[in-house]
């Protein structure tokens, strides 16, 4: 990561920058403005922002949370060789967005890889079988599919996609 962009946990110093954030999806802009800070405090979501130190702007953000996924919602490739439980631990990328003025400059890719890296590191202390995400539309879905995410077979919550943690590990370690 170059000097210009820094990943930081959403904190008090970012609050004045939230109003200028615009990714093209109103719900994702409003989440950052109105809910992200509270959800951090409530420990519902860990919010990381990508801070542009040159422009003093927020270029993007993503959220990570621990979730439980029903066995019946997971694909066979994840469940066939693991101990049988009704629910499994997983890591949710709840939201991920890049400000419009930065889109197409590979920052979305950086955000996603940073989220996957954090998810993998955390899973070594608190296990997680997969990274899950809820794509907000066609575009978002194809973005995640570009990185190897697949649709969950049952899709109880709409466009829910997954990437097995083993795949994430191979991505970063080659093993
Ligand atoms: C989707 C989004 C995060 C992509 O961010 P971005 O910074 O424009 O994307 P990048 O420039 O980092 O692209 C990285 C790679 O993904 C690919 N990509 C980007 N958007 C894509 C899409 N919609 N479908 C398929 N591939 C896509 C790029 O071609 C690039 O591929 P490459 O590295 O192989 O060349 C961004 O457009 C955004 O925030 N959109 C609005 C909010 C949203 O839909 N969020 C999604 C999750 S809720």
Image (tube, rainbow, N blue to C red):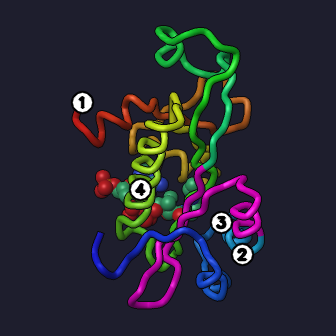
Up-down relation of residue 61 to residue 154 (above or below): below
- In depth, the one of 42 and 21 nearer the eye is 42
Question: Which numbered marker is on residue 40?
Answer: none
Q: Quadrant of residue 54?
A: bottom left
Up-down relation of residue 61 to residue 170 (above or below): below
Could you tell me residue 149's position as x and y percent?
A: 46, 37
The residues bearing labels 4 and 1 have C-alpha atoms spaced at a distance of 19 Å
Residue annotated with mark 4 = 114
The residues bearing labels 1 and 3 have C-alpha atoms spaced at a distance of 37 Å
- Within-10-Å neighbours for mark 2: few <14, some 14–19, many 20+: some
- Within-10-Å neighbours for mark 3: few <14, some 14–19, many 20+: some
- Within-10-Å neighbours for mark 4: few <14, some 14–19, many 20+: some
- In depth, the one of 14 and 98 nearer the eye is 14
- Pointer 2 or 1: first along the chain: 2
Q: Are marks 2 and 1 in contact (CB under 8 Å)?
A: no
- Pointer 2 or 3: first along the chain: 3
The residues bearing labels 2 and 4 have C-alpha atoms spaced at a distance of 22 Å
Magenta-colored stretch includes residue 40:
yes
Q: Are marks 2 and 4 in contact (CB under 8 Å)?
A: no
The magenta-colored residue range is: 35-64
Q: Residue at x 70, y 66 (%)?
A: 36
Could you tell me residue 43's position as x and y percent?
A: 71, 55
Of circles 2 and 1, which is in front?
1
Residue annotated with mark 2 = 33
Residue annotated with mark 1 = 175
Residue annotated with mark 3 = 25
Residue found at the very far front of the displayed protein: 125
Q: Are marks 3 and 4 in contact (CB under 8 Å)?
A: no
């Amino acid at each position: 990561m170059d000097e210009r962009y820094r990943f930081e946990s959403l904190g008090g110093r970012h609050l004045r920058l939230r109003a200028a954030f615009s990714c093209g999806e109103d719900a994702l802009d409003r989440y950052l403005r109105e809910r992200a800070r509270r959800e951090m405090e409530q420990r519902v979501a860990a919010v990381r922002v990508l801070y542009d130190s040159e422009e003093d702007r927020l270029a993007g953000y993503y959220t990570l949370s621990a979730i439980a996924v029903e066995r019946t919602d997971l694909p066979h490739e994840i469940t066939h060789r693991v101990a049988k439980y009704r629910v499994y631990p997983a890591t949710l990328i709840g939201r991920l967005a890049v400000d419009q003025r930065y889109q197409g400059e590979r920052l979305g890719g950086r955000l996603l890889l940073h989220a996957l890296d954090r998810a993998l590191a955390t899973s070594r202390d608190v296990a997680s079988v997969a990274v899950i995400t809820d794509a907000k539309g066609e575009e978002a879905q194809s973005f995640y599919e570009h990185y190897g995410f697949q649709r969950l077979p049952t899709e109880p919550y709409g466009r829910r996609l997954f990437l097995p943690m083993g795949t994430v590990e191979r991505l970063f370690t080659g093993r």
